[in-house]
């Protein structure tokens, strides 16, 4: 289904503006990321304490989060168990549980809640999780690089892979700027974004290959622009359909899925953007520096 017809937009000609936009956001995000240090990461990665607390009367989860936020204890998360608003899982940094319980006692009374369980997430466990997440990401990137090299050629694979790294850094930058914490759900979001981004890019690459075979010329800029314009309707329709679903998850999924859905939302938008402006532009600029006859 075509929602946009007969466009003739010079996407490749706008690549420098796209480069500058991405570079500004990513560099700003990296500055915020370096300034926050360990606060960028949730308990899953840096270790901390976890407790299961049950209140005698129903308590709103947002109220619990507001209390913890006012304590200035750094990273924390609150997960409601069940639907009666009585039982919660609280994760926070080392040495913070006593402070949290003291505040709950002052506000609700020490007899109004019971600690059902308490444990620690050790740094060694967090290091293991971090290493596994890094290994999964690297393995995924290698797989994508090999797949696109076999299906197209090496330069296309490099363009698609760099676009994925661009998307990851962009999402990471936005999370750092908005002071969100990276946990295991964010890593899952990163892998999902990588799959979405490369799928969108492959569709454009397919049309580029078809048009290169038809024209058999050296004006790759025109071929790439025509290919992006011809697939623009499909690109926008795919992006909008996924973004609508993620918006529902963002607004209706609750606080537990907030960072996960936010990461997906940013990633899907930027994944669509990078497929159009970044992946193809890398190929054109590489060709200008080192001319190459595409054999697709």
Image (spheres, grey):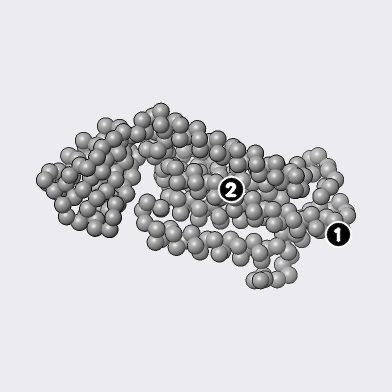
Q: Read off the residue under disc 1.
A: 214
Label 2 with label 1: CB-CB less than 8 Å:
no
In the picture, measured across the screen, residue 3 lies left or right of residue 62, that is right
The circle drawn on residue 286 is: none
Q: Residue at x 43, y 50 (%)?
A: 259
What is the crowding at mark 2: few (fewer than 14 residues within 10 Å), some, or many (at least 20)? many
**Which of 112/2 is in front?**
112
* Image location (x, y in percent) of residue 71: 25, 41
- Residue 42 vs 210, above or below: the answer is above
Q: Residue at x 67, y 71 (%)?
A: 2
- Residue 264 vs 33, above or below: the answer is below
Q: Residue at x 24, y 58 (%)?
A: 84
Q: Which residue is drawn at 74% across and 56% down?
A: 206
Q: In the rendered structure, which disc, 2 or 1, sits on the residue that comes first in sequence?
A: 2
* Image location (x, y in percent) of residue 48: 33, 34
Residue found farthest to the top: 124
* Mark pair 2, 1: CA separation: 30 Å
In the picture, measured across the screen, residue 75 lies left or right of residue 156, that is left
Q: Read off the residue under disc 2.
A: 194
SS class, disc 1: helix
In the picture, measured across the screen, residue 52 lies left or right of residue 105, that is right
SS class, disc 2: helix
Is residue 91 visible in the rendered image? The answer is: yes
* Image location (x, y in percent) of residue 97: 24, 37
* Image location (x, y in percent) of residue 134: 53, 36
Residue found farthest to the right: 216
**Which of 20/89 is in front?**
89
Is residue 284 visible in the rendered image? The answer is: no
What is the crowding at mark 1: few (fewer than 14 residues within 10 Å), some, or many (at least 20)? few
Q: Quadrant of the N terminus?
A: bottom right
């Amino acid at each position: 289904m075509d929602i946009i017809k007969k466009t003739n937009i010079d996407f490749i000609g706008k690549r420098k503006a796209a480069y500058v936009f991405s570079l500004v956001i990513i560099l700003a995000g990296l500055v915020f990321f370096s300034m926050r240090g360990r606060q960028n990461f949730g308990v899953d990665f840096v270790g901390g304490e976890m407790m299961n607390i049950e209140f005698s009367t129903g308590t709103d989860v947002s109220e619990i989060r507001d209390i913890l936020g006012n304590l200035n204890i750094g990273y924390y998360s609150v997960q409601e168990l069940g639907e009666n608003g009585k039982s919660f899982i609280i994760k926070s940094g080392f040495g913070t549980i006593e402070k949290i319980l003291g505040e709950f006692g002052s506000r609700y009374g020490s007899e109004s809640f019971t600690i059902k369980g308490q444990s620690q997430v050790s740094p060694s466990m967090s290091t293991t999780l971090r290493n596994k997440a890094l290994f999964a990401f690297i393995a995924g990137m290698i797989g994508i690089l090999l797949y696109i090299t076999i299906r197209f050629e090496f330069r296309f694979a490099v363009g698609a892979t760099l676009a994925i790294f661009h998307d990851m850094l962009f999402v990471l930058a936005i999370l750092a700027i908005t002071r969100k914490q990276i946990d295991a759900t964010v890593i899952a979001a990163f892998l999902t974004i990588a799959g979405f981004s490369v799928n969108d890019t492959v569709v454009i690459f397919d049309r580029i290959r078809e048009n290169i075979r038809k024209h058999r010329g050296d004006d790759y800029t025109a071929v790439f622009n025509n290919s992006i314009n011809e697939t623009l309707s499909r690109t926008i329709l795919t992006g909008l359909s996924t973004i609508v679903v993620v918006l529902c998850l963002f607004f209706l999924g609750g606080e537990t899925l907030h960072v996960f859905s936010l990461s997906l939302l940013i990633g899907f938008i930027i994944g669509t953007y990078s497929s159009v402006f970044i992946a193809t532009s890398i190929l054109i600029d590489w060709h200008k520096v080192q001319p190459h006859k595409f054999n697709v």
